[in-house]
Image (cartoon, helix red, strand yellow):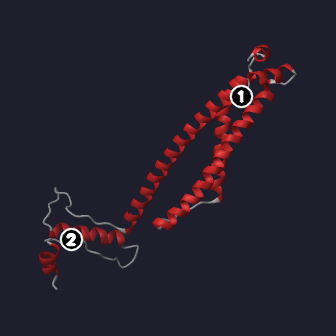
Amino acid sequence: MPYTTVQKRVSGTFWLDDIFCSAVSRDTMTEAATQITGLLRERHHLTSAEDDDFNVRRPEDLIQAQLATSRIMTILLGSVASLSLLIGGIGIMNIMLVSVTQRTREIGVRLAVGATEWDVQLQFLSEAVALSTLGGVLGILTGVFSSAVVEQLFEFPTKLTPEVLAIGGLFAASIGILFGYYPARKASQLDPIQGLRYE
């Protein structure tokens, strides 16, 4: 059928929606786009003061749009991950503070028999790092499993490299050190006499 008949009878439109063109070579693509723009402006009777009433898209434009979308998704996922790490760190700090309170007598005994402040700090920091590392390992396993599910269900490719997994583990351990420092410091500053009197 003539395209005008298809437009009027089938699609119900009275204009061409898409025109696909190809340049002679990659080097001439910019010039071809300029010529197409000029021709369309002439055919649409647009003056120099009027904006284009059409779009000319090149493959580079589509690639740039995909890259921009990828960057936005990376920033979004990074923000969500940062918020999750912050909430997890606060949870670790609260758990360690409760642990310090419940083990005040134990800390007092350790300090009374010769343990240094650094020994007590190291004890609680190692516990915080162990907690955060365990959470990080569980998170990595969940991420690997969920990425496989996403690839299978949505046919959306995911890329997990050993570097990404290693960075995730290091971040988990550093969160434990960062948020476990205050409870460990509080435990190391405890007065041994008060610790021994604590019930």
Going from N to C along the chain, the mark reached first, 2 or 1, is 2
**Pointer 2: what residue?**
39
Q: Residue furthest right?
A: 113
| 53 relative position to 123: left or right | left
- Residue 162 percent coordinates (x, y): 66, 58
Looking at the image, how many numbered discs can be counted on the residues? 2
Tag 2: residue type?
A: Leu
- Residue 117 vs 126, above or below: the answer is above
Q: CA distance from mark 2 to mark 1?
A: 73 Å
- Residue 121 vs 112, above or below: the answer is below
Residue at 46 percent of width and 57 percent of height: 70
Q: Residue furthest bottom?
A: 1
**Camera-side mark, 2 or 1:** 1
Q: Which mark is residue 184?
A: 1
Q: Nearer the viewer, residue 135 or 37?
A: 135
- Residue 2 percent coordinates (x, y): 15, 84
Badges 2 and 1: C-beta atoms under 8 Å apart?
no
Mark 1, secondary structure of its residue: helix
Residue at 45 percent of width and 53 percent of height: 73
- Residue 88 vs 76, above or below: the answer is above
Mark 2, secondary structure of its residue: helix
Which part of the image, by quadrant, shows the N terminus? bottom left
Tag 1: residue type?
A: Ala
- Residue 73 vs 46, above or below: the answer is above
